Every structure is written in C-alpha cells, then in structure tokens.
Amino acid sequence: MTRRLVSDAKRRHTGGAGADSNGGPRGRSPNGAPSVDELWLETLQRLCSRLAHELKGALNGVSVNLEVVRSRAERPDSPASAVRQYAESAAAQLGMVIVMTEALLALTRPVRVPVELPTLVRRFEAIVAPAARAEGRSLEIAEPIDGMGTTTSAPNAVRLVLGTMLLRATQEAARVTCRTEEGEVRQLRLEAQDGERLTVDAAVAAAVAAIGIRILATGEGITIAFPAADDERTQGRT
C-alpha cells in the first residue's frame, strides 16, 4: 500500500509538463541539484518505509487480540470481563492504524496556500513518533504548536523541510523536543535533550533557501524559519 501511495504522489508531482514547487520546470534545477519535488518524493518514500513496519505491527496486534476475544467468547462460561482488556487493546491499536494511515494519505494530497503549519506538524508527528517510540526514542511536540500560524511557502517545500528534519532528528537523538518560536517569520525549533547534536540536511537546506525557508543549526538544535502568510502580516499579527 505504501509503495502505491508514493507512486500515485509521484505521478501527481512529476508527471507531465508544468512547474515544480520552485516555480520552474519540473525535474532538476539549472545547476543539476535535486529539485524540491524530487527531494520531497524521496522523503515520502523514507517515511512510508518507517511507517510500514509500525502499521504491520499494529495490525498484527489487532489480529492477535481479536483472536483471543473470539476464542474466549466461544466458551459458554466465559464472562465479558475475560475479553474486555483484549477488545480494548485491539480498539486502541486499530485507532493507531487509522491515525497513521490518515496522516500518510493527507501527505500525498495537494495542499492549499497558505499552508497550515500546525496541521502539517501534527501529521508528521503521527508518522514519525510511533517509529521513534518503537526504537526507544521520543518526539515531544511542546505547546503552543497550534499558534504557529500559516506560511505562503510552496507546500511541497514545507512538507519536505518538516518531514526531513523531524525524521532526521528522531534518528539522531534519543529525545527530541519540537516547539515554536514566534517572530517576523514562523520558526520551529527542534532540540536534542541528552547532549546529542542535530544536523542539517545540506541538500534540503539549499533547495528551500531560494524560496525563503531557512534551516539553521544552533547549539544542540535546529531552527526552521518559514515566511509568514501575507494576509497575517497585513493584519499586524506575528
């Protein structure tokens, strides 16, 4: 299923003539570097690969718990309490599958401008956090992420930056905190909590710099700065 999602997304983003997320022809940039769309599709493939394992594990858990419910329900003297915990566990695992699948499906669809940054952060959290937990790592989204606002940056560029950096951070550090920093631009701060150091993907940073998104490595963390939506600036909101 995950391969089909990436294939469908690739046809939408790279098939036929048109402009890419930089506003130029689809494909490689004039200097031969990968375009935003190419890099986003590579990132989507990596996200799918990590998510596939978590989906398989959760579905296996649902199957095992439902089999216990079925077998115990067939016993005439088995009370409802004997299967309740297994039914609740199956429901919780199925809920996780739904959340992860919906987040992944949303990332393959077109996104309107201005881009809702909190919505995208939550979608990537739903995909990245379960895999991190399975490896003994953690991703904490500190409040108030919902106040981050919107940006007029190209949707695939925003998805590329968030997907790459959140995935990379949770692979480089055991504990990662994600929080907002408000200013003239929308800023997202990723920090390692145990003395580890996060690094920037140079190819991604170069691809998005031309359209106004900055990725800066400072101390033990990374700051991602998005231009604010024009309509918010004109209304005097930060």
Image (tube, rainbow, N blue to C red):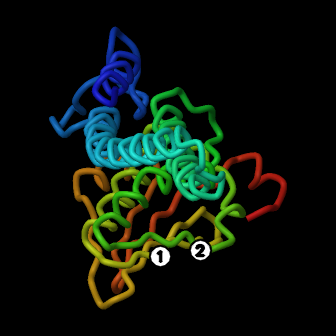
Figure quadrant of the C terminus: bottom right
**SS for dot 2:** loop
Residue under pointer 2:
142
Q: Is residue 6 above or below residue 150?
A: above
Q: Write the residue at 33% across / 67% down.
A: 170
x and y percentages locating residue 57 in the rendered image: 34, 48
Single out the residue that lies furthest toward the right. 235
Which mark is on residue 177? 1
**SS for dot 1:** strand
Single out the residue that lies furthest toward the bottom. 195
Looking at the image, do the residues carrying marks 1 and 2 touch, with CB atoms under 8 Å apart? yes
Identity, as a three-letter code, of the amino acid under mark 1: Thr
Question: 118 or 127: nearer the eye?
Answer: 127
Question: Would you say residue 182 is visible in this rendering?
Answer: yes
Q: Earlier in the sequence, mark 1 or mark 2?
A: 2
Relative side of 138 to 77, left or right: left
Q: Write the residue at 52% across / 48% down.
A: 90
Single out the residue that lies furthest toward the top. 16
Question: 173 or 131: nearer the eye?
Answer: 131
Question: 83 or 184: nearer the eye?
Answer: 83
Figure quadrant of the N terminus: top left
Query: Mark 2: few, some, or many residues within 10 Å (few <14, many ≥20)?
Result: few
x and y percentages locating residue 6 in the rendered image: 33, 27
